[in-house]
Image (cartoon, rainbow, N blue to C red):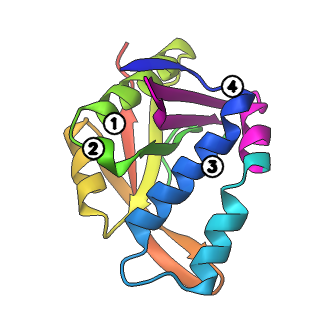
Amino acid sequence: MKFRLARPSDAPILAAISIEVWLGTYIRRGVNAIFAEFALNEFTSAKLDALLQDPNEHVIVSENEDGLDGFIRISRGKAAPVAGCSSVEVSTLYVQPRHHGRGLGRALLEQGLNYARAVEVPSVWLTTNSENAPARAFYLKQGFEKVGTTHFRIHDQAYLNDVFRRVISR
């Protein structure tokens, strides 16, 4: 596993990984227009390029001999949806499904936590879909605790998400 900071030239790759992981994780019975439009409008090269140039965003990629296979995004200055959390969010942790089970997600998370330690924040928080049992189990195993719930909204639909927090040890 090789890790490095994301570069602007990675934007289209990060967009493609985001679409692959998001659709594969959350679309269970078929892609409808609402979800297709969300994915195609949210995960664009232009949006990812802008994100990579934002000083409050820190993106670390995992790279193998053929290209990128996952990334973690840590966002500073983000208000948590529940009290008791810092302003640092693990906004995204995506690993291509074919690379699951190799410890890549855990290693990327550790890279992100190392960054959080370096900027001296007391904790990080994240949200994940309440029905995403593998993600929920993963974060609990990595020392996160569930501290509340929120909703992810697309158009007029709201999807229950769990809010997790992890204290950063020095």
Q: Residues within 10 Å of mark 2 (few under 14, many from 20)?
A: few
Which circle's residue, 3 or 1, is located before the other in the chain?
3
Residue drawn at point x = 55 percent, y = 58 percent? 19
Quadrant where the image shows the C terminus: top left
Neighbour class for label 3 at 10 Å: few (<14), some, many (≥20)? Answer: many
- Circles 1 and 2, Cβ within 8 Å, touching? The answer is yes
- Taking depth in this image into account, of 32 and 142 the one nearest to the observer is 32
| SS under mark 1 | helix
Sequence-wise first label, 1 or 2: 2
Q: Along the polypeptide, which appears first: circle 1 or circle 4?
A: 4
| In front of the other: 56 or 40 | 40
Q: Amino acid at mark 1?
A: Gly
Say which amino acid is labelled 4.
Answer: Arg
Q: Mark 4 touching mark 2, by CB under 8 A?
A: no
Task: Find the magenta span and give its range.
Answer: 47-76
- Examine the structure image and report whether residue 75 is included in the region drawn in magenta: yes
Observer able to see residue 56: no
Of pointers 2 and 3, the one earlier in the residue sequence: 3
Q: Residue at label 3? A: 15
| Residue corresponding to mark 4 | 7
In the shown orientation, is residue 13 left or right of residue 44?
A: left
